[in-house]
Image: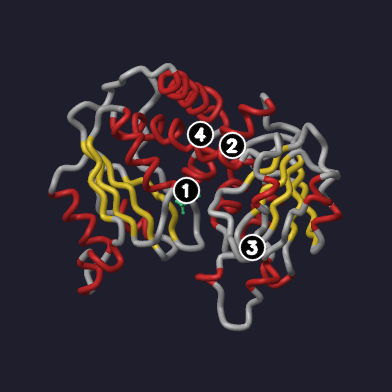
Amino acid sequence: MASKLKHILKSQQFSREWLEEEFFPLSSEMKKAVLAGQTLDDLKDKTVCLLFYEPSTRTRVSFQQAALKLGALAVATENAKEFSSAVKGETMKDTTRIINAYHFDAIVIRSDYEGAAEEAASVSEAPIINAGDGAGQHPTQSLLDIFTIHEHFGKVDGLRVAFVGDLKYGRTVRSLSYLLGKFKDIKVHLVAPESLQMREDILEYYKENGIEFEAHSDIAEIVDKVDVIYMTRAQKERMNEGEDADGAGVVLNRELLDKVSEKSIIMHPLPRSSDINEIPEELTDDPRMMIFKEAENGLFTRMALLKMVIQ
Ligand code: CP
């Protein structure tokens, strides 16, 4: 049985050993069970509360489905920013105390500000799962991403990864960076307009953890040099006035895709934006495109995570 996790707050908390010996195997086990149509009751009689202060399709629905697939019940506040007592000025700490008072077995929180999940965890007996905190982190997305990478290549060591788009506000690239730092001989290419490049704290982390990195403004410079092209959406909702949302929308078109190795993969946490169109619809069925596989793996990995925090 996998060891118990208290909270899931940030990607730095995980070790390589945990990823390889516990998380990957349990996620694969969940995948096998779901694909075989097995009914699981590992979390029978358990309850999960989802508090989402920001819009979400994948994270919210996959956590709900993960709970149901394990026999647990999920209660969701889909638009907590408008329909919870946050409107009346209630703090994250008090909201968490209330959810604890109702004896939930886990609380999944998506918030619009950095540090919200840690704030909740500071007063919570029930495990807190960070489902995205503003421009901070999205650890469960990075876990499904690293699972997808490991599943595809059979390894993570030695891979060359390009992060493309809005790297300043994109929380998924921040969380995935922390996980890549657990592995050896990683090279990261950072493709973004200068104003939306990766923040200094992550660059420091790369240096401290032996990740070689290089910044670029043109995606054409790296498409034939990497194993993973991780595209991202321009996080317009987080940008300050004067920041160039359209400039952040680096696009992967057919001409560029033709230069990508047959062995490489394209990832994107989704949603992809329909205005900037960073991965155009006509490229969706390319065999290198992992974007919907990532989303599907979100179900299996979140089942594994719910088991690890609740059981
Ligand atoms: N990737 C991701 O977090 O998607 P949602 O915002 O739809 O949950």
Of the residues shown, which amino acid type is indicated by label 1?
Lys
Residue under label 2? 146
Q: Are marks 3 and 4 in contact (CB under 8 Å)?
A: no
Q: Is residue 94 above or below residue 230?
A: below
Picture disc at residue 166: 3
Q: Do the residues labelled 2 and 4 touch (CB within 8 Å)?
A: no
Q: Earlier in the sequence, mark 1 or mark 4?
A: 1
Q: Is residue 209 above or below residue 174?
A: above
Camera-side mark, 2 or 1: 2
Picture disc at residue 297: 4
Color encoding of the figure: secondary structure
Q: Are marks 3 and 2 in contact (CB under 8 Å)?
A: no
Of the residues shown, which amino acid type is indicated by label 3?
Asp
> What is the spatial separation of the Cα atoms under label 3 and label 2, in whole angstroms?
20 Å
Q: Where is residue 125 in the image (x, y as percent from the top left)?
A: 23, 44
> What is the spatial separation of the Cα atoms under label 2 and label 1, in whole angstroms?
14 Å
Instruction: Give whichever of 163, 57 is nearer the camera.
Output: 57
Q: Where is residue 184 in the image (x, y as percent from the top left)?
A: 71, 34
The image quarter containing residue 3 is: top left
Picture disc at residue 157: none
On the rendered structure, is 283 left or right of 101?
right
On the rendered structure, is 196 left or right of 189?
left
Q: Position of residue 203 (x, y in %)?
A: 68, 57
Instruction: Give whichever of 73, 211 is nearer the camera.
Output: 73
Q: Earlier in the sequence, mark 2 or mark 1?
A: 1
Q: Which of marks 2 and 4 is nearer the N terminus?
A: 2
- Residue at the image position 64 percent from the left and 63 percent from the top: 166
Q: Do the residues labelled 1 and 4 touch (CB within 8 Å)?
A: no
Of the residues shown, which amino acid type is indicated by label 2?
Ile
Q: Are marks 2 and 1 in contact (CB under 8 Å)?
A: no
